[in-house]
Amino acid sequence: MLRLTDKSVDASRLFLAFFGILFSFTALAGAFLANSKVNADDTTKADTVNISVSAACTMISGDNTYSTILNPGQESADLGPSNIKVVCNDPNGYSIYAIGYSGDTYTGTNHTKLIGTNSTISTGTSGDNSWWAMKLSAVTGTYTPSIMNGYSSYSVVPDTFTQVARLTGATDVGDSAEGSNLQAFYKIKSSTSQIADDYAGKVKYVLVHPNTAVPTIPPDMQDFTLAQCQTNATDHDYIVRDRRDGSEYTVRYLSGRCWMTQNLRITHSMGQPEGTILGTDSNFSATSITFDGDLTLGSDYTQAYYHTPTAADIAASENQYTAEQLGVWYNFCAASAKDATNHGCDNSTAYSGSEDICPSGWRLPNNTGNTTGGEMYDLKTALASDPSPFSPIYGGYYSGGGIVSAATSGNWWSSTSTSVAFQYRMYDYNNTLYTGPRNAKYQGYYIRCIRST
């Protein structure tokens, strides 16, 4: 029996403001001159008030996962629907673009293939081969979008950003609770020769306006060089993508290195079982790392643990951040890519190596104290008066089954040990960066990877 998993929708929301709509109002002010026989209308003055209203479009959609089990030669029923709602006040309307991808990348040559261990399922709807396809259905109403490029019926999942729907003249949609609505469906077929395995793929939707705009695909950070970072991210953040799981991060050129300005949040490689990160595209000596569960065991040094934000964690940070902004807390086993079968982070071994969980070409920054050199120290010194280019997050750290110092500090791992049981860290407190104080390896801290060469 073939199990076929379609993690179909990775809907993006873009909030864009491109155009202004100008309104003019005239207020009449009358003034009577004392002891004058001149009509009041002859002395009226006019005040002109100009108001610019920005154009904005919003796409609302859930991150849905659909699964099905197929026998060889079987075709699935409709998988879906995923509901997509757009509210837009741009008189030029909007466009929705889509792209299909899987575990390798959505910018390479195989981005619309469902990847499995033994074989692939190609995109398409022809012949007797295995395939997957998508269609969109416009929900009728006052503002009914048009389906583009044949996606009103099952069509090939696009392998580049392709316009799949649009609405023109959408001026009044922003005033309507109805909005403009679509539904997305998927279908999969397995051939009689399809190898039994689990397969997964995604479709990403991007909202743009006006209709002529085309979305930009972020470069894979594994291929993003220090020179490119210096060119593109010296004065502002730049978006790159970790091709292991498809997560997008901002980076910035700071103190001679390229720093992530968002916390790492990988928990598994795309298309792999939950908790498994492949080492073929990272800085591992092992072939992969497998997480051993949540950070709840207090002082365990020997296994890789992580913790993703809960509703309680978000509340503890005084609701300053979303779960994506908070990122993931890792113990040092996880940060250094050491799992239960690949030890090296126990409390009897000092570890200052270069292996870590960062994407290939990136690594944990080093640190040699508060008064000497090191990459964390250099950053702290460069941003002494204003740490905002680093975009610190005040989510505390994880210890003993809970978050400590939430809403008041941010804490990040370094690659440098202070002893067998502790590592150097960098932290932000009261809008100032500090380095030097040690982290216990069993505690959970954030990760900001760097590219220095």
Image (tube, rainbow, N blue to C red):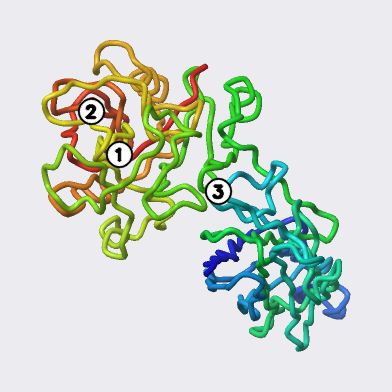
Identify the mark nearer the N-term, 2 or 3. Answer: 3
Question: Which residue, given by chain and number where applicable, does mark 2 sit on?
Answer: 344
Mark 1 Cα within 10 Å, few/some/many (few <14, many 20+)?
many
Q: Is residue 105 left or right of residue 340?
A: right
Identify the mark nearer the N-term, 3 or 1. Answer: 3
Residue 317, compared with residue 399, is above or below; it is below
- Residue at 31% from the left image edge and 20% from the top image edge: 353
**Would you say residue 316 is visible in this rendering?**
yes
* Residue 203 spot, x, y in % from top left: 64, 61
* Marks 2, 3: nearer the viewer: 2
* Residue 54 spot, x, y in % from top left: 71, 62
Depth check: give the residue in front, 291 or 119.
119
- Which label is found at residue 246? 3
Q: Amino acid at mark 1?
A: Ala
* Alpha carbons under labels 3 and 1: distance apart: 19 Å
Residue 163: image quadrant is bottom right
Q: Is residue 115 left or right of residue 306?
A: right
Question: Which residue, given by chain and number where applicable, does mark 1 sit on?
Answer: 334
Depth check: give the residue in front, 234 or 74.
74
CB-based contact (under 8 Å), mark 1 and mark 2 = no
- Residue at 26% from the left image edge and 49% from the top image edge: 292
Residue 263, compared with residue 163, is above or below; it is above
Give the SS element for disc 1: helix
Depth check: give the residue in front, 117 or 405.
117
* Residue 344 spot, x, y in % from top left: 23, 28
Give the SS element for disc 3: loop
- Residue at 77% from the left image edge and 60% from the top image edge: 209
Give the SS element for disc 2: loop
Q: Is residue 55 left or right of residue 44?
A: left
Identify the mark nearer the N-term, 1 or 2. Answer: 1
* Residue 213 spot, x, y in % from top left: 80, 54
* Alpha carbons under labels 1 and 2: distance apart: 11 Å
